[in-house]
Image (cartoon, rainbow, N blue to C red):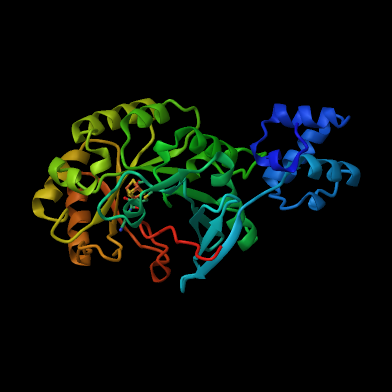
Amino acid sequence: MASDSTEKRDLHTLTRGELMELLSELGQPKFRAKQVEEWVWEKNARSFDEMTNVPKSLREELAKRVTLGGVEEVARQVSLDGSRKYLLRYPDGVAVECVGMPGGNRLSVCASTQAGCAMGCAFCATGAAGLTRSLTESEIYEQVMHVRDDFNARVTSVVLMGQGEPFMNYDATLAALRRLNSPEGAGIGARHLTVSTCGVIPQIMRFANEPEQFTLAVSLHSAVQRTRNALMPGVRKYSLINLYNAMGEYVNKTGRRPTYEYALIGGVNDTDNELQALCDFCEGTLAHVNLIQLNEVDGSKFRPSTDLRAQDFVRRLASVGVEATVRNSRGSDIDAACGQLKQRALRGR
Ligand code: SAH
Ligand code: SF4
């Protein structure tokens, strides 16, 4: 383990094996690894000094050899509904947004898996900016812990619906979910951890084979191939028929009910023809449709549909046995709603 400060690694990036090795180099007993890990992951310590059950001399040695970085909050906005949106920056200067949404004794977090996104969906502010880079396991995890500590409350659910496409960053996303789920991490039940994908089929199949009961949401937005191609060019190569079949396999394999996200865009995917196609796509399958009025994005020509039209969708879907709800967008007054998390240039920093 190098002690040169330019080569110092961060504690968050060490595997358990590497941490044990470091501690044994420092002549420490094995149980120290567990103590240190508890501080890093469960307690989200921001400095070595917080590690009060670790001898001071060891804390000093650790500080010489590794860093204990973390996210830095650069800005926040508080919504009238109590949601808080944070701009969090990592040590290399890359920043992402995440949102904490309280309600009763619940606290939901919407976190990002990438800075930006390469999929280019036409209605999405993140897509418009392109991809900066994928986040690591701990960078995804730390967003949730930042929100937990800020609200000083247990996080009851996490949705990976911030910036980025989780299935274009599969390994880090899965590792972060596992740590969020673990009793030695955030201890959040797997069913309360949701991944949202624009429909990257090979990774949906991979996800179906994971042992945990994580929840899956798929952004559908249209069951008409031509419309979906125009709205979601990044997943053009995964046709709707293949998506349909993959979701059938997912349900067979897991027995779990996936959610389809459908942002209603006036005159684009809310016509009778589109509604019929959506009913055909979902009828007879295990599915929940989450309808959401499009959040308007600066410079975009798309507009939300009407509330009456959203109710038509709910009724028609119900008439073919498909459960659907219209989801309220939280935090829309602070641009924290889905699709509005935009990376900001951090001028002067
Ligand atoms: N990349 C993943 C997850 C992040 S986007 C995905 O696409 O599923 C989270 C959700 O917000 C997706 O369902 C996405 O389609 C939706 N979304 C993006 N822009 C939106 C907008 N302007 N209005 C409403 N929902 C939007
Ligand atoms: Fe990326 Fe999801 Fe936005 Fe599409 S909707 S551009 S996949 S973040």
Q: Position of residue 39 (x, y in %)?
A: 74, 45
Q: Residue at x 53, y 63 (%)?
A: 104
Q: Position of residue 18 (x, y in %)?
A: 71, 29
Q: Position of residue 116 (x, y in %)?
A: 41, 50
Q: Residue at x 61, y 43 (%)?
A: 187
On the rendered structure, is 277 left or right of 78? left
Q: Residue at x 40, y 29 (%)?
A: 208
Q: Position of residue 244 (x, y in %)?
A: 23, 33
Extreme residue toward the bottom, this view: 80
Q: Residue at x 29, y 37 (%)?
A: 286
Q: How many marks?
A: 0
Name above or below for residue 66 compared with residue 92: above
Position of the N terminus by quadrant: top right
Quadrant of residue 33 within the rendered picture: top right
Give whichever of 262, 40 is nearer the camera.
40
Give whichever of 215, 218 is nearer the camera.
218
Position of the C terminus by quadrant: bottom right
State whether residue 10 appears in this view.
no
